[in-house]
Amino acid sequence: MQSARLFTLLNALKAHGHDVELADFEPLMSVAAPVDDLPTKPVKVRCEPRMVCGGELWFHFEGAEAIAPADDAHIADVVTAVKGKLARPT
């Protein structure tokens, strides 16, 4: 289920023109910054159960910062959060 949710997010981010890669062996994706932007590290997003929400799947930035539930209703929120993270220069 985690992979399916990441794949849904991957498609949404690609529709916004982002270069996205899924990890082979863990529920993780890496979103590269557009080439013409300021140098920015790729943003890493995980899809994992959030224990404070009864184990419901959530998207998290690497380092455990929760973004939103991993459901269709929140995909646009996650795309916005990822784009915001990419817009901050490192």
Image: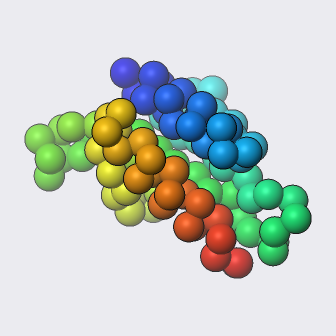
Q: Which residue is situated farthest in the bottom direction here?
A: 89
The x and y percentages for residue 3 are 47, 25
Give residue 37's quadrant in the image. Answer: bottom right
Q: Which of 61 and 26 is in front in this view?
A: 61
Query: What is the total number of numbered labels drawn onto the structure image?
Result: 0
Give me the residue at 36% from left, 33% from top: 72
Q: Choose between 19 and 17: the one closer to the eye.
A: 17
- Residue drawn 74% across the image and 69% down it: 40
- Residue at (33, 51) in percent of width and height: 68
Q: Is residue 47 visible?
A: yes
Q: Is residue 38 above or below residue 63?
A: below
- Quarter of the figure with the N terminus: top left
Q: Which image quarter: residue 86?
A: bottom right
**Between residues 74 and 62, which one lies in front from this camera angle?**
74
Left/right placement of residue 44 relative to residue 77 reads right
Q: Residue at x 56, y 37 (%)?
A: 12
Task: Note whether residue 62 is visible.
Answer: no
Q: Whole-percent x and y of residue 70?
A: 34, 38
Q: Front-most of 36 and 67? A: 36
Where, quadrant-wise, is the C terminus in this rendering?
bottom right
Q: Position of residue 43 (x, y in %)?
A: 62, 57
Height in image: 5 above or below 87?
A: above
The x, y position of residue 55, in whole percent, is: 18, 38
Would residue 24 be found to the left or right of residue 37 on screen? left
